[in-house]
Image (cartoon, helix red, strand yellow):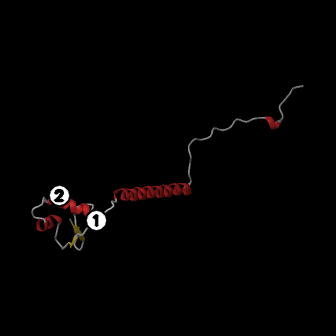
Amino acid sequence: MTNYAPASRITRPIAPVSKRTVLNAKGRIFVRQASVVTVAVLAAIGFFSGQAASAGSTAVKSHFTYVTIHSGESLWQLAGEIAPNADRREWIAQVVDLNALTSADVTPGQRIALP
């Protein structure tokens, strides 16, 4: 008489589990949205914490002179008219920085603050 194990005790080899996670379309969208929200929250925290750190106990009132750019006018020409004794490149850099411009190019009708 041969002793065989009952059918319920037979073990089968387990297939190896893939270590790579595969997301379906909804999962990929969720991960993208979660990433965007995380970046936005971290940027907001950095922005507001930077402002809180730079805030002082004294109030500073800033008054700027604003001009509207006319057709054919450039910041280089404006620098010559408004600040003739200053270095035009430095003055233009200040205007670009003050108005958060991406370049020194201006368009007619654009209103900019002057340092």
Task: Tell me the distance, in whole angstroms, between the alpha carbons under discs 1 and 2.
Answer: 24 Å
Q: Is residue 95 left or right of residue 36?
A: left
Q: Which circle, 1 or 2, is nearer the viewer?
A: 1
Up/down of 11 relative to 39, above or below? above
Q: Nearer the viewer, residue 50 or 72?
A: 50
* Residue at the right extreme of this rendering: 1
Determine crowd level at label 2: few under 14, some 14-19, many 20+ residues with C-alpha closer than 10 A. Answer: few
Q: Amino acid at mark 2?
A: Glu
Residue 101 in the image, given as x and y percentages of width and height: 27, 63
Residue ID for mark 2: 90
Q: Are marks 1 and 2 in contact (CB under 8 Å)?
A: no
Q: If you read the primary sequence from the N terminus, does the residue marked by circle 1 or circle 2 appear first?
A: 1
Q: Is residue 34 left or right of residue 4?
A: left
Q: At x 45% / y 58%, what residue is drawn?
A: 41
Residue 60 in the image, given as x and y percentages of width and height: 28, 65
Within the image, what quadrant is residue 102 found in? Answer: bottom left
* Residue at the left extreme of this rendering: 85
Within the image, what quadrant is residue 4 found in? Answer: top right
Residue 58 in the image, given as x and y percentages of width and height: 31, 63
Residue ID for mark 1: 60
Q: Nearer the viewer, residue 18 or 89?
A: 89
Q: Nearer the viewer, residue 51 or 21?
A: 51
In the picture, the quarter occupied by the N terminus is: top right
Q: Is residue 61 left or right of residue 30?
A: left
Residue 114 in the image, given as x and y percentages of width and height: 21, 67
